[in-house]
Image (cartoon, rainbow, N blue to C red):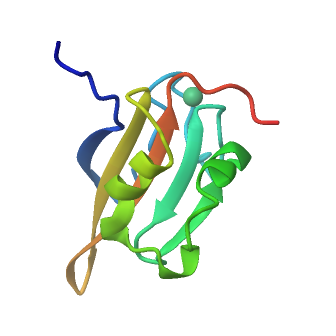
Amino acid sequence: MEEIISKPQYAELEMYADDIIHCPVCGYPTQSQDGEFNACKHLEFIYIGELDEFIYKKSRFERNTNFLDYEYFQFSDFRDFLQKAEYGNSFLVLEVTYETMACGPVCSTDIYGFDFYSEDDE
Ligand SMILES: [Zn+2]
């Protein structure tokens, strides 16, 4: 019998800088109109590529990933590290590339993690 491997799902999106990501489960925006940050219970983390930093980590996510040395964490490590954190196929990772026009087009990539079966954070 073939073994079914449960692993996080990935989607890549391209968006304009002003577009706001909404939770794919409940539709809750990750940002309010005035740019304030919002988190529903499905949102596990937000990683900002430009800053090389997580701007949001749910406490459960923090526990699951406490093996990780955030200081040396790199963008390209993501897939590896989510599997090590034992996230399965209810986990959706959105890799969002924003295009802005500064002096010519500038791209930056942010990563959003959503867990479809997430419980409320304790
Ligand atoms: Zn949600």
Q: Is residue 106 left or right of residue 79?
A: left
87 and 96: which is toward the camera = 87
61 and 51: which is toward the camera = 61
Classify residue 71 by image quadrant. Answer: bottom right
**Residue lying at the far bottom of the rendered structure:** 103
Quadrant hosting ligand 1:
top right
**Residue lying at the far top of the rendered structure:** 1
Residue at image position (53%, 55%) is: 46
**Residue lying at the far right of the rendered structure:** 122
34 and 47: which is toward the camera = 47
Relative to 76, say whether 28 is above or below: above
For residue 37, say whether it is visible: no
Residue at image position (23%, 22%) is: 3
Residue 119 spot, x, y in % from top left: 68, 25
For residue 40, say whether it is visible: yes
Residue 41 spot, x, y in % from top left: 66, 32
Residue at image position (56%, 73%) is: 70
Which quadrant of the figure contains the N terminus? top left
Residue at image position (42%, 32%) is: 88
Relative to 24, say whether 97 is above or below: below
Q: Is residue 105 left or right of residue 65?
A: left
Classify residue 43 by image quadrant. Answer: top right
Relative to 10, say whether 90 is above or below: above
52 and 76: which is toward the camera = 76
Q: Exactly how many numbered labels are in the figure?
A: 0
Classify residue 67 by image quadrant. Answer: bottom right
Residue 29 spot, x, y in % from top left: 55, 37
Which quadrant of the figure contains the C terminus? top right
